[in-house]
Amino acid sequence: MGDDGRHHHEFRARRVDGTNPDGLEDAAAQSRLTHDRMSAEESRLFPDICKGDIKRHKAFLIIRNNILRMWFDEPRVQLVLEKVMEKLTQVEPQYATEERVLAGKIFLYLERYGYINFGVFKRITIPIGSKKEQPRVIIIGAGIAGIIAARQLQYFGFDTIVLEGRSRVGGRIATFRKNGFIADLGAMVVTGLGGNPVSVLQTQTNLDLVPVKHKCPMYECSQNVVPKAKDEVVEREFNRLLEACSYLAQTLDEDINGKKQPYSLGDVLEQLIRAQEKAVREKYLQHLREITKMKESLRTILTSMCEIRNKCVTLHKEYSDVLQVPDNGNVLEEFVIRDVAKNLVITTEDYTRLETQAEQLKEQIRVAEDNPPPRLYLSVADRRILDWHIANLEFANAAPLNCLSLKYWDQDDEYEFTGCHLTIRNGYSILPLALCENQNIKLKRSVKKITYNKTGVEVIVTNTEDPKNEIPETYRAAAVLVTVPLGVLKENIIQFDPPLLEEKQSAIDRLGFGNLNKVVLCFDKVFWDSNHTLFAHVNASTSSRGELFLFWCFTKPPVLIALVAGDAANVVECATDDVIIGRTLVVLRNIFGSAAVPSPKESLVTRWKSDPFARGSYSYVAVGASGDDYDILSRPVEYPGDRIPRLYFAGEHTNRNYPATVHGALLSGLREARRIADAFLGSIYEVSAP
């Protein structure tokens, strides 16, 4: 799909500009790899290639990139080694002949690591071994991480069973569908296709992606639109404040009396705003002091001019009197005349000089009074716009800024994908539903306890299919993969036996799990500007800045989704639907007029924090946490004395580079499927160093 939103059935790795590339370089980039350099993991797996001669290094990269391109050419059909060798013989005959063994190893590596043959595709081969020989793995949670892991493990030859507490699959991917209306209640945005594995799944499942238009009108509490120039000025100042926070993050988080003192982004941001306000006030007061000083100097000059003027009058009179004395050749009288004349000239020059100084000072005072510095750092209107941008950042992180780590809140920024952001016209739930095909999934199974030891794992669940008669059930397997959200782990709903190590439990406690809620309103007609996919609402106070601050617009059918972020997201959890929907309609009618906004045909309010199977929306780096905590959460757990791990973890909260995203959860599921396969089947793609 290009940036115009039209759907294309053929697939290629997408560029930012929307064109479909065909090169090896693009295939590597779409796989989050560098086309001309081995990754750190590849160097570890293939040390003889990494440390060998340049010829073999080049061969590795050419073969790897060609295999990736073959997969992207048709991701709806399994890519098999026979086809790879056939294609290599056509495009790179030298490597197909001389490096046949290496090509096989690279193929197995790419397949095991989930670079190829993942998602929804037609199987050509069948897993090796009988049903009895297949190791069994229990996956807890039918979100995107759990489903993709189960699907991949099944492809690798494992017997899998997915236990899901809800009555549906998808986890935090949930789509409202009623009377023809569609709205995503959880995950909604694809944050760029360049390098995103969702790009492959889009082709496999026919997700209808629509680019998000950047133009976003901003409405005040009435029908008034914030001037674009005003918003741009405030946004630049907001970005300047964030840059200052980034600089301070490198200096503030230092040892204080031998202890680390972490700071929050919100606290430092507000301190910077207060410092700016103080600096602006001080500058304005200094301006007034300078004007006062100039006026005092002018008063002194005018006083001196008055005195000199009187002196000039006196000297002029003396000079006139002296000139009236008859000239009798007296030398003393001549000296007196010249002395008086000299004093008169000097005094007149002094007056002229002071008069010039006075005019200059008057002009300086006029210029200063006509061009005063701002009296306020931010006007009331400016602060409201700034609060909107802060609310937008709180939406991105699903948390108030005073909960975010100053130093690490944006630790994953460098891994952002390229390309525009997109929404799914036909609903995100299409993806997990497609991935669930032919999967062994047990719904309404609420996990209570996980026991693991050298022989395997035992999972005790409560079957809630009949709410009046909840039945305990026990499932046993060789290993278990836990993909429940971080919010559920924080609640200690699942008992682990033995308990999790302190390192992992501490990481669970340190990382934050935020909240973001939505108000969905479905109408029979469009009353907003259909040219926009977004419009903003500026709230009247800092405390309510995240309340209904952004509306997503969909026209076919007419649906508005209002976002509630920051502290306001938690307030929604306690209010009734009638109150929240009524408040939303008031906002819309203030913007578009009461007559233009009808009552909605359908409506819904999310409460993700109250959801017992989510306990929030997505993870963030809280004060005192760091990116290392994501890595700690991702590590498998071994029972003491066991040769292989039995307990594994996946989910967006275990992906350091891509947290809080669908693709992050997806990649974590592929990662753990590979780890489990490596543990139970062996790393057959590794080439031992000589």
Image: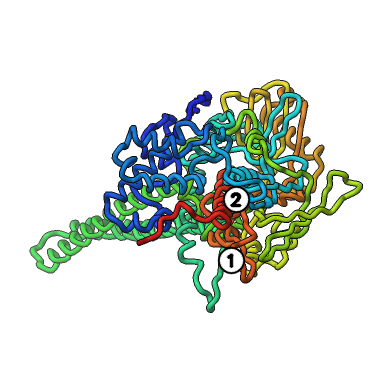
Tell whether 239 sits left or right of 86: right
- The correct choice, above or below, for 518 with respect to 206 in the image is below
CA gap, disc 1 to disc 2? Answer: 27 Å
Tell whether 547 sits left or right of 214: right
The residue closer to the viewer here, 235 or 319, is 235
For mark 1, does the 10 Å Cα neighbourhood hold few (<14), some (14 to 19), or many (20 or more) residues?
few
Residue to which mark 2 is pinned: 652
Q: Residue at x 69, y 58 (%)?
A: 489
Which quadrant holds the C terminus?
Answer: bottom left
SS class of the residue under badge 2? helix
The residue closer to the viewer here, 632 or 346, is 632
The residue closer to the viewer here, 100 or 75, is 100
For residue 264, say whether it is visible: no
Tell whether 433 sits left or right of 99: right
Q: Residue at x 62, y 59 (%)?
A: 511
Which residue ends up furthest to the left in the rendered image?
329
Residue 41: percent from the left, percent from the top?
44, 55
Which residue ends up furthest to the bottom in the rendered image?
257
The tally of labels here is 2
Residue 203: percent from the left, percent from the top?
54, 31
- The correct choice, above or below, for 378 with respect to 210 in the image is below
Q: Earlier in the sequence, mark 1 or mark 2?
A: 1
Residue to which mark 1 is pinned: 643
Three-letter code, disc 2: Glu
Q: Dividing the picture into quarters, in which one does residue 87 lie?
A: top left
For residue 284, say whether it is visible: yes
For mark 2, does the 10 Å Cα neighbourhood hold few (<14), some (14 to 19), or many (20 or more) residues?
many
SS class of the residue under badge 1? loop
Residue 219: percent from the left, percent from the top?
61, 34
Residue 555: percent from the left, percent from the top?
64, 24
